[in-house]
Image (cartoon, rainbow, N blue to C red):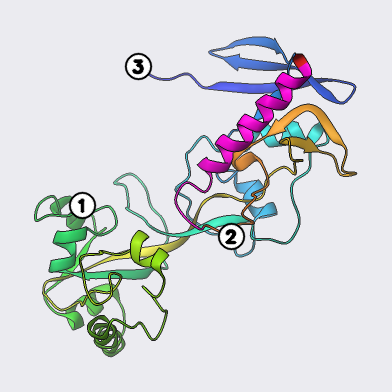
Amino acid sequence: MIPVRLTVTAIDADKGSPSSVSLKQDGVTRQISCRGGLISATGGFNRNPQLRARMLRQPVAEYCPGAPGHTGQLHELLSGLGARHGDDGRDSALRTPVSVRKRADAKSPSIPAYLIADETALRKYGLGMVRPGRWGRAPFLRDGYLTRAETLPELAAKLGSDQANLVETITRFNQFARTGIDEDFGRGSTDYQRITAGDMKHAPNPCLGPIETPPFYAVRLFPGDIGAATGFVTDESSCALRQDGSRIEKLYACGNDMHSVMGGNYPGPGITLGPAIVFAYVAVRDIASRLS
């Protein structure tokens, strides 16, 4: 069964507030009234090239693992009602390094960094899209997502990197893994890092393990973002605000459609879902208070 996309084609307003929404699906358009209010929670605009170029900090990350439906289509309609995006100078997106696997029917440029692991780490933890264990690597090796070599100089050659630099970097890293102190980046220096990004059974530092057991593996990493942090400015009730700070009654935003309460910081998993749930609840309470 192929899902049919539902599209918002227009938002009608009464005295500046949304009064009805026109929806199109499978060639049929319907109009739905907004008696209580309209809550925008479409996931943001991180899959919209034009909005990304205009709203995100330069240079804009080339890759985004956000859902394909996060097109920001509704944002232009809400802007027409007077809703404004945040422009307080905080980071405009939630950043993350991403690995990219080349599809058989697609081509893309590649200017990557590399995430490197040895056989022990790959079996125990996996690497990028490669799952832990001994099996299932062949497709990733075959299409070039995963690179394998018996020695570090061979791995550097396959990656097009300077062999001496790679060996020196990993030698230094292995020293940190043995002492448990990362002198370069401080990995594992906080409880949060050790719990969320480490193996608590591994000592002396849960976030550092030596790269020393051949064969060696690498995946390419690219700058990316998991969603836009820039969204519509709201008040404490999740109601969208105009440029002059006045409320657009009956129009609400939450999730990535709302200007991030975290200012583009990503303190942990769920940082978009948690506020989305909280402010959706707040919005519904505000709607209910007007209808009661």
- Give the Cα distance between marks 3 and 1: 29 Å
Which residue is rendered at x = 20% and y = 65% of the image?
A: 201
Query: Residue 175 sits in which quadrant?
Result: bottom left
- In the image, taking residue 287 as reference, residue 144 lies left or right, namely left
Depth order, front residue of 17/25: 17
Q: Which contiguous range is marked in magenta? A: 267-290
Query: Residue 255 sits in which quadrant?
Result: top right
Query: Residue 243: where, in percent of width, then height?
Result: 86, 44
Q: Is residue 289 above or below residue 212?
A: above
Whether residue 273 appears in magenta in the rendering, the answer is yes
Element at label 1: loop
Residue annotated with mark 2:
60
Q: Are marks 2 and 3 in contact (CB under 8 Å)?
A: no
Depth order, front residue of 121/138: 121
Depth order, front residue of 84/279: 279
Residue type at numbered disc 3: Met
Q: Is residue 236 above or below residue 63?
A: above
Whether residue 242 appears in magenta in the rendering, the answer is no
Element at label 2: loop
Tell me which label, 3 or 1, sits earlier in the chain: 3
Residue annotated with mark 1:
131
Q: Residues within 10 Å of mark 3 (few under 14, many from 20)?
A: few
Tell me which label, 2 or 1, sits earlier in the chain: 2
Residue type at numbered disc 1: Arg
Q: Residues within 10 Å of mark 2 (few under 14, many from 20)?
A: some
Query: Residue 111: where, in percent of width, then height?
Result: 42, 68
